[in-house]
Image (spheres, grey):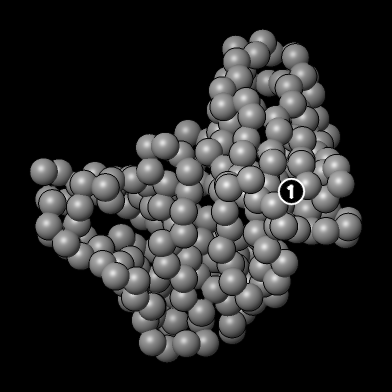
Amino acid sequence: AQTVTQSQPEMSVQEAETVTLSCTYDTSENNYYLFWYKQPPSRQMILVIRQEAYKQQNATENRFSVNFQKAAKSFSLKISDSQLGDTAMYFCAFKEEYGNKLVFGAGTILRVKS
Amino acid sequence: GAGVSQSPSNKVTEKGKDVELRCDPISGHTALYWYRQSLGQGLEFLIYFQGNSAPDKSGLPSDRFSAERTGGSVSTLTIQRTQQEDSAVYLCASSLAGFANTGELFFGEGSRLTVL
């Protein structure tokens, strides 16, 4: 079974600085999908960014980018120019190519300080 | 509706009582998921519905848990004889058909269940 590990329970960053959240996963599949979801204090989860394993180019969405290292099974999220609204819990998630469900990590609480 | 709607937002119950949690997915979304989020833990998959197919119940933790989806839309998660360890936030999510190619789930705000 696939597992997703987020080794940083909590992190803090100053406003306008850059922070990187770590995620590793375990799978024997060759193709799959990886995601970062954000859960703000309102509790509603939203998708931040998605990466397809067969694409070597790292995904980017505005201030959010990933560092996808397939051989190392690592999928970190970099947030540039951090904003107060980035304060949330961030979940890394994995999905098999033809699977139906997402497997989530335990999450990392990110606090952006002014 | 505009988004995934869940009710109740918060539920406090006594140990041994039954509870029902409701999820109204985004109109047109054929896939519906229930996840459980316990304090300090990630999201635990519970059950998945896709159209008229048999649901994937592989994540239900015990036979006290059941879920149904009527008319391919609204879903109800039922927990019988609640235990204190059932206390958690129960999240519902929906997605379009062909989820396999997108991976984007649309989540509700969850139902926080507290079992005293």
For residue A58, side relative to residue B66 (left or right): left
For residue A2, side relative to residue A76 (left or right): right
Residue B9 spot, x, y in % from top left: 57, 27
Residue under pointer 1: B47
Residue sitting at 58 percent across and 47 percent down? B3
Residue B92 spot, x, y in % from top left: 63, 44
Residue A60 spot, x, y in % from top left: 34, 75
- Residue A96 visible, this orientation: yes
Q: Depth check: B49 or B5 in front?
A: B5
Q: Depth check: B73 or A25 in front?
A: B73
Helix, strand or loop at label 1? It is strand
Query: Residue A6 sits in which quadrant?
Result: bottom left
The chain to which mark 1 is attached is B
Is B81 rendered above or below residue A10?
Answer: above
Residue sitting at 58 percent across and 67 percent down? B103
For residue A27, side relative to residue B73 (left or right): left
Residue sitting at 46 percent across and 59 percent down? A47
